[in-house]
Amino acid sequence: MPVEIDIAKVASLARIALSDEELRRYGEQLGAILEHAERVQQLPTEGIPPTSHPVPMTNAFRDDVVTGSLPAEDALAGAPEAEDGYFRVPPVLGDS
Amino acid sequence: MTDYEAVIGIETHVELMTDSKMFCGCPVDFGEAPNTTTCPVCLGLPGAMPVPNAEAMEGILKIGTALDCEVAEISYFHRKNYFYPDLPKNYQISQYDVPICHDGSIAIDVGGEPTRIGITRVHMEEDTGKSIHMGGGGRIHDAEYSLLDFNRSGVPLVEIVTEPDIRSAEQARAYGAELQRIVRTLGVSDARLEEGSMRFDANISVRPADDPVLGTRAEIKNVNSLRSLQRAVAFEIDRQIELIESGGTVVQETRHWNEETGKTTSMRSKEESEDYRYFQEPDLVPIEVSAEWRDAVMAALPELPAARRSRYQGLGVDARVAGVLVEADELGALFEEAMAAGGDPRLIGNWLSGEAVAWSRAENTAVGASPLSAQHLVDLAAMVADSTLSASAAKQVLGGVLGGEGSPAEVAEARDLVQISDSGVIEAAVDEVLVAHPDAVEGIRGGDMKPIGFLVGQVMRSTGGKADPKQVQQLIRDKTAG
């Protein structure tokens, strides 16, 4: 049973533009993954606590110590656009 | 017209004043040049791994414990996914189904009506960067582009969410003020609204007073002071009632408070509803709070504002005065010091909340910047207790001390306010007044006690306020008796 998913919605949530062909292909692939997940969900798991992390570990904290930061030039090095030490981005509430 | 009831819940964000950020070693340092306190972790660069700040975890536990919350033995970090440029990772590390603290409350009192405001949850997350909208007059809707500064990105942020228990704009403000006092008392944040280290969002709906069903709510953002919180909530309640009364319906939306116009306006965001696709942050292990840790945090809590107010009231200070003393650090400190030196709580509390505050307003100077010391207050109260000064003279002396005229004894001397201790002098003054007002004396002798107050006033006047009014009254009673 193929699982029905709204691949266009998933793509838009991830801000990825897909062609019709890609929508079809990824829809199929993602569907197959979900189908597998559905099969796994049929396993009897009553009484087994959910696992979020495979390692039995908690509270991996660090002390509140300043270890330094990048120089602004380095921080901005990967930015498509920068201005006066700021990252520059297109209008926030535009049509996208 | 139908009676309406407002139903209000408040979400508060508090930045913790740790040395370093929540998940990396960048400094929490405001006012630096843009993008100078960032690193691969808080810029969301590929491969960077977050590690939670132990001090921030301690801070949120302090807040949760102070708000009488239950602490989750195990809680988790989640990724809240959304696209907005002030969030370089495209997700915010937050908490979702299991917050670290939940089910607490804050007690407030508006107009003598004590109310408990339930706290739904207190969870840990990270702050976002700051954006500046360029062009179009700086307004977000008309901006040509935006500039991003990620210095604030990753600063520890605590979100505190109330139950919809608040019913009025005044209660909203009282809640905000009490939460701010608590956070400051804990010393985990400076909680400055105008600088954004404490921020309120209010969810407001109205319904007919007898209707159990909640109305549609609007969320108000951009509230930068306690005063604007109260104004914004009051405006929004009125707006919704007027809308419903005129046949309209309230739309669920986010509205922006405009301080200048005193109005909220719709924020015209995208139509689609948010889908945050929360999932557990795979890079962070669960948080486990042992009973020992929880108890240690509880044991180390400072005296909270509510406890301090009730302690002051226990000393005989009235509720309003206790509130003022707890609100203003410098007054509270002077009061505490004066109490430690054995001063009279009621008198000193009243002077600080009354004369000292009035002086401070009139002179536009902090009481703490005046020469007034706790010892001055103790000495002044002692001078009232041994009748060296009348209550009204003591207030004048206090004014002199605040104004730098010297110690209470010096001011009382210099202003000639020391009460007359020679009873012969007072008796002569009383006799003089009695002779001058035979009608009043006659009235008293006939059983009408009302003129006594008048006669006391006359004697106080003729002695320049330096007689002890109690002694004067007794003399008048004695001399008019029979």
Image (cartoon, rainbow, N blue to C red):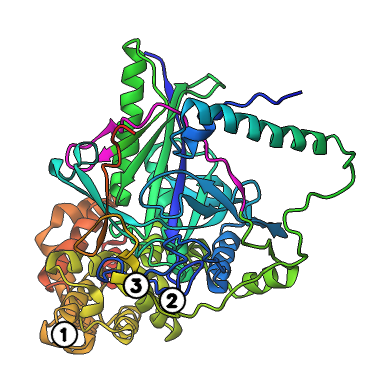
Residue at the image point whose x is 35% and y is 42% from the top: B221
Left or right: B342 in relation to B357: right
- Kindly check if marks 3 and 2 are in contact, taking CB atoms under 8 A apart as contact: no
The residues tagged by marks 2 and 1 sit, at their Cα atoms, a distance apart of 48 Å
Q: Which residue is mark 2?
A: B19
Out of B408 and B2, give the one closest to the viewer. B2
Q: Quadrant of the N terminus of chain A?
A: top right
Crowding around mark 2 (Cα neighbors within 10 Å: few <14, some 14 to 19, many 20+) is some
Instruction: Using the image, name the chain to which the residue with label 3 belongs.
Output: B
Disc 1 residue type (three-letter): Val
Residue type at mark 2 is Asp
Stretch of the chain drawn in magenta: B257-280
Give the Cα separation between the discs numbered 3 and 1: 47 Å
Instruction: Return the x and y of residue B399 as percentages of the image width and height.
Output: 17, 74
Question: In x, y percent, where is residue B185?
Answer: 46, 68
As drawn, the label of residue B411 is 1
Q: Which is more N-terminal, label 1 or label 3?
A: 3
Residue A9 image label: none
In the depicted structure, whether residue B465 falls above or below residue A82: below
Q: Is residue B100 above or below residue B253?
A: below
Q: Classify A94 as above or below B465.
A: above
SS of the residue at dot 3? loop
Q: Earlier in the sequence, mark 2 or mark 1?
A: 2
Place of residue B395 in the rendered image (x, y in percent of width and height, measured from the top left): 22, 72
Q: Chain of mark 1?
A: B
Residue assigned mark 3: B29
Query: Does B448 appear above or below B124?
Result: above
Judged left or right of residue B360, residue B82 is right
The answer to whether residue B367 shows anywhere in this view is yes
Upstream in the sequence, badge 3 or badge 2? 2
